[in-house]
Amino acid sequence: MLWDYIKKRMMENPDKTVSDDSESITYAQLIEYAEDKKTTLLHDKYGVLCKSELNAAKAILSIMAADKICVPLHHSYGQSRIDKILANANISYLIEDNGVKQISQETTETENLSDVIFIMYTSGTTGTPKGAMLTEENILTNLHDIEQYFKIDNTDKILIWRSLYHLAPLTGEFLISLVKGLDIIFYENGFDPTGIRKAIKDNEITVIAGTPSLFYHLCNPSINRSSSIVHRSLKALASSGECMTKPVAERMMKTLDNCDIYNIYGLTEASPRVSYLPPEMFKNDYTSVGIPLNSVEVKIQNGELLVKGNSIMKGYYNDKESTDKTIINGWLHTGDNAKIDENGFITVKGRIDNMIIRGGMNIYPAEIENAVKQDSRIKDAVAVGEKDDKSSQRIRLTIVCNHLIARKNLTKKDVFDICKKYLQPYQYPEIIEIVDKLEMTRTGKKMRT
């Protein structure tokens, strides 16, 4: 069902290409490759662990064509996490850059996977991984929804810099681009704003997706004074994965003034996209992630965003307990604190599990980070809660200064004075750190450790 739809749409643009630094393949060749390889994929489930994202894309499409189950992996998460996922997913066959290999004896399957196409493991790097079972209907529903609002077409080129191990680039960038007929270019170096900026310019990229952190750096005039020239080819971008802030939004609008900016929201368990903000509304409502997709219902329960629809996962693989806690009466509990206004527009405040509780008050890190970044001397910030000797938590605030002169002269006392100016006393940090840069994940999210 899913492969037949994607194949049909790809055949409308047979000469469009998918490429990286070393290889380029047309849609027609990619279809031929997948149809040929599917005859060799005789087992029910395959892991995909390729160093090349283009090779990963080929493998994923081949598994889809064979009507088998795909479990994407990525080397950047380390062998320990890879081993956990392989064990958790009961993977016996692994597709790597040089082909298929058997890594263990096949075991009896305990889950009903008859309609499952992907098992996507959540991106957290600690604890036991959880695999979201996504059906063909889940992915197809989400693709149809994205196709309705995302105004891209076969005149566009998209740069994909995040691994297809993550569902946001897999569904919302790669598969939707095949459906819409875009030229696709994989950038292999992960979160590298300087390299990505160069790739945009060199390839005349018109579409890119990423986190607000990436776009803040891409639009940094101190790195490239001619940034407007670098980005002049861009036509549409999708921002997700973090809460949008005023400094990021203002910089994006100034640098990308001719670009449609889609502020979107999603999560793996929803295939992944849930809502989008129409670009024409970004200027006046950039903190909102907009309205639900056509097939999606949303509501707020005890401050948490709940989602329902045909794109919601079947459940977690071999984890009924977690499934029953996450999907209740058909509603997916996202774990995100949010509000919905009278017009149905959603604003996400942050992760409930990142919430800091102090003195009986609920504090969301994004509230602190956004507040202190109103001071022009602060470029970026991350706030986390840490256990103390009391029953509540203390706040650690780590900041990056905007300029070298500020790095030399801005003291911890100065930062605390900024906090006093913009925050309430219960939000003041106990620990302040000033660093040269924040640690980022490979997908461009701030690390909260």
Image: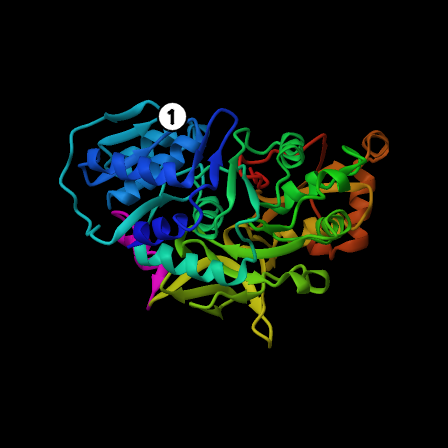
Q: Say above or below: 345 vs 320.
A: below
User: Going 79% across and 36% down the picture, which residue do you hit?
Assistant: 226
- Residue 312 visible here: no
Q: Amino acid at mark 1?
A: Gln
Can you tell which quarter of the image residue 412 is in? top right
User: In the depicted view, which residue is nearer to us: 201 or 247?
Assistant: 201
- Counting other residues with Cα less than 10 Å from the Cα at mark 1, is it few (<14), some (14-19), or many (20 or more)? few
- Locate residue 315, reporting x and y percent: 31, 54
Question: Along the horizontal axis of the image, is 49 left or right of 159?
Answer: left
Q: Say above or below: 219 vs 425.
A: above
Question: Along the horizontal axis of the image, is 325 left or right of 390?
Answer: left
Which quarter of the image is occupied by the N terminus? bottom left
Question: Along the horizontal axis of the image, is 203 left or right of 60?
Answer: right
- Residue 325 visible here: yes
Residue occupied by mark 1: 79
- Locate residue 211, reporting x and y percent: 59, 45
- Range of magenta residues: 313-329
Instruction: Tell me if residue 317 is in the magenta stretch.
Output: yes
Instruction: Tell me if residue 175 is in the magenta stretch.
Output: no
Q: Say above or below: 248 vs 303.
A: above
The residue furthest bottom is: 342
The residue furthest top is: 98
